[in-house]
């Protein structure tokens, strides 16, 4: 609100008049940021923490160009470096080579004709011993009896603490000749988890439920991963490669693009099948070609 002062003349006298006057001002174009600060924490010699982000929008009804620069050490990156609003800026940090302590930086966002805006970024690095982490923590598998195809389950082994790379060994700790491993030793490094595949062979197994344990050993601890296998009666099992389909078309613009569906046999033997439209016949058609 702007106040204006003036003179009011009446009957030869002058009086001072103070009256509020509203003025419509055009807002200057500028940027708005969704965050003012971002905080990260990490273990020295461990995985980098997940990236964080903030949004950049215009204070007017039109898009504005922007550019991003980082004021700080090379442990922080911001992407994309430029673009137009609205946008989302992703901030990533990497504590590799940093000693334990607190670190600070600033991400500056600029647009022509407006003042710079900034987001303060802090990184706290802590010392930690290696910590073994295996996921998933259990595996449930199933296969039809007599299936010639092996069944696999991938395990992700990583160091959830610090201290650098983590060496490990893996074995099947129970008498389960149907269960083998793709490797018996390996290493999980910072930002580089190791993948271990559990392979199940059902050849010669009668129907039933079988149980085994995968044992992972490191210098910083161990983990046991239970594995269960259900062997079912052999026979065909009908399956599809999708749960639903979405079609897009313009009114009066003819047919949409065709979508393919794969009919699968998830069991053994041969699947004999046929298809039928239960609804939507006025706009949907099937073709086996």
Image (spheres, helix red, strand yellow):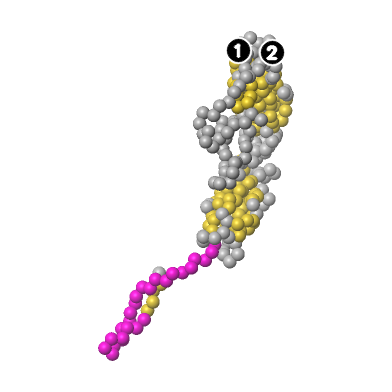
Nearer the N terminus, badge 1 or badge 2?
2
Q: Position of residue 108 (x, y in %)?
A: 60, 57
Q: Residue shown at 68%/10% (left/top)?
A: 204
Q: Which mark is residue 203?
A: 2
Distance from the alpha carbon under mark 1 to that under mark 2: 13 Å
The answer, for residue 212, to whether it is visible in the render is: no
Q: Residue shown at 39%/71% (left/top)?
A: 22
Position of residue 98 relative to residue 16, above or below, is above
Name the element at disc 2.
loop
Q: Nearer the viewer, residue 100 or 158?
A: 158
Work out which quarter of the rendered image holds the N terminus and state it. bottom left
Q: Is residue 241 left or right of residue 279?
A: right
Q: Position of residue 264 (x, y in %)?
A: 63, 24
Farthest bottom residue in view? 12
Mark 1 lies on residue = 233
Asked which quadrant contains residue 140, the reply is top right
Q: Position of residue 151 (x, y in %)?
A: 66, 21
Q: Residue shown at 46%/69% (left/top)?
A: 25
Instruction: Point out the stretch of residues depicted in magenta.
Output: 6-30
Asked which quadrant contains residue 194, the reply is top right
């Amino acid at each position: 609100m702007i106040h204006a002062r003036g003179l009011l003349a009446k009957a030869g006298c002058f009086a001072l008049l103070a009256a509020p006057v509203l003025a419509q001002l055009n807002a200057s174009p500028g940027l708005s940021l969704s965050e003012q600060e971002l905080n990260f924490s990490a273990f020295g010699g461990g995985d980098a923490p997940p990236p964080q982000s903030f949004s950049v929008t215009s204070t007017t009804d039109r898009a504005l160009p922007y550019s991003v620069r980082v004021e700080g050490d090379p442990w922080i990156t911001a992407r994309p470096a430029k673009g137009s609003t609205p946008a989302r800026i992703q901030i990533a940090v990497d504590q590799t080579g940093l000693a334990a302590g607190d670190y600070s930086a600033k991400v500056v966002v600029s647009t022509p004709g407006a003042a710079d805006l900034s987001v303060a970024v802090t990184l706290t690095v802590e010392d930690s011993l290696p910590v073994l982490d295996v996921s998933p923590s259990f595996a449930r598998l199933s296969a039809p009896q007599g299936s010639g195809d092996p069944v696999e389950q991938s395990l992700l082994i990583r160091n959830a603490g610090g201290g650098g790379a983590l060496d490990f060994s893996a074995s099947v700790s129970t008498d389960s000749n149907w269960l083998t491993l793709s490797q018996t030793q390996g290493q999980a490094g910072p930002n580089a988890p190791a993948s271990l595949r559990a392979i199940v062979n059902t050849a010669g197994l009668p129907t039933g439920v079988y149980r085994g344990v995968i044992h992972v050993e490191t210098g910083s601890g161990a983990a046991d991963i239970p594995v269960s296998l259900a062997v079912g009666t052999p026979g065909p099992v009908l399956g599809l490669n999708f749960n639903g389909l979405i079609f897009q078309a313009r009114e009066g613009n003819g047919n949409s693009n065709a979508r393919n569906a794969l009919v699968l046999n998830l069991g053994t033997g041969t699947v004999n099948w046929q298809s039928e439209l239960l609804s939507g016949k006025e706009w949907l058609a099937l073709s086996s070609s």
